[in-house]
Amino acid sequence: MTTSDALADRMALRDLVQRYARGVDRRDAALLDSLFVDDAEMLVFQDPGSTEPTSTIRGRRELGRITKVVTRYVSTTHFIGNHLVDLAGDTATGETYCLAYHVYDGGGGERRMLVWSIRYEDRYVRDGGAWRFAQRRLIVDWTHDHPLVGGDRLQP
């Protein structure tokens, strides 16, 4: 693999993780569906320190329905940080840091913000000439839930 091929692959993988964040935040099920191989899975570790997944989602179509899960929030923003990958031909592994902001109605007219510090541990495959997720492990390292000051300006 040439240096330019490796750079192009790294850029394509970075684009993949950013498109995932966009798909979730924009509630775009078709976009999410396009990012996974047919038999992909996501293992969610919602409890910090847990060795067993809280939930597992299997199959590309089910993964595209993540957009339905996030409708409980008024708004979400997934901010992608560190993204490191190890390339091995048409497969790769990677780790991505993410701060996920979830704005929700806390009752009594109060808007709240739930922040998750997430690490995604990914397995990628080149499928039909494009990089896709084969597996995502969503690991929540910590959370913070607090009132959202000025949240009344958000548009649902």
Image (cartoon, rainbow, N blue to C red):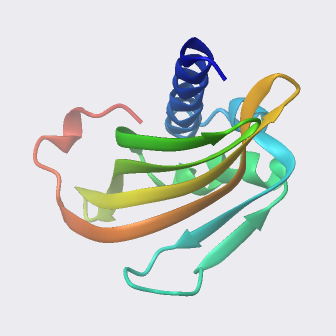
Position of residue 42 relative to residue 125, above or below, is: below
Task: Determine the residue positioned at 52% across, 87% down.
Answer: 51
121 vs 26, nearest the viewer = 121
Asked if residue 23 lies left or right of residue 100, the reply is right
Q: Position of residue 65 (x, y in %)?
A: 73, 50
* Viewer-proximal residue among 120 and 154: 120
Image point (22%, 67%), residue name: 144
Horizontal and vertical percent position of residue 140: 40, 68
Residue at the extreme top: 4
- Count of all numbered marks drawn on residues in the image: 0
Residue 116: image quadrant is: bottom left
- Which quadrant would residue 92 be assigned to in this image? top right
Q: Nearer the viewer, residue 71 or 90?
A: 90
Q: Quadrant of the C terminus?
A: top left
Is 127 on the left-hand or right-hand side of 156?
right
Residue at 30% x, 64% y: name it.
106
Coordinates of residue 53 in the picture (x, y in percent) = 59, 80
Q: Quadrant of the N terminus?
A: top right
Tell me where residue 4 sits by quadrant: top right
Residue at the farthest front position:
2
Q: Position of residue 139 (x, y in %)?
A: 46, 67
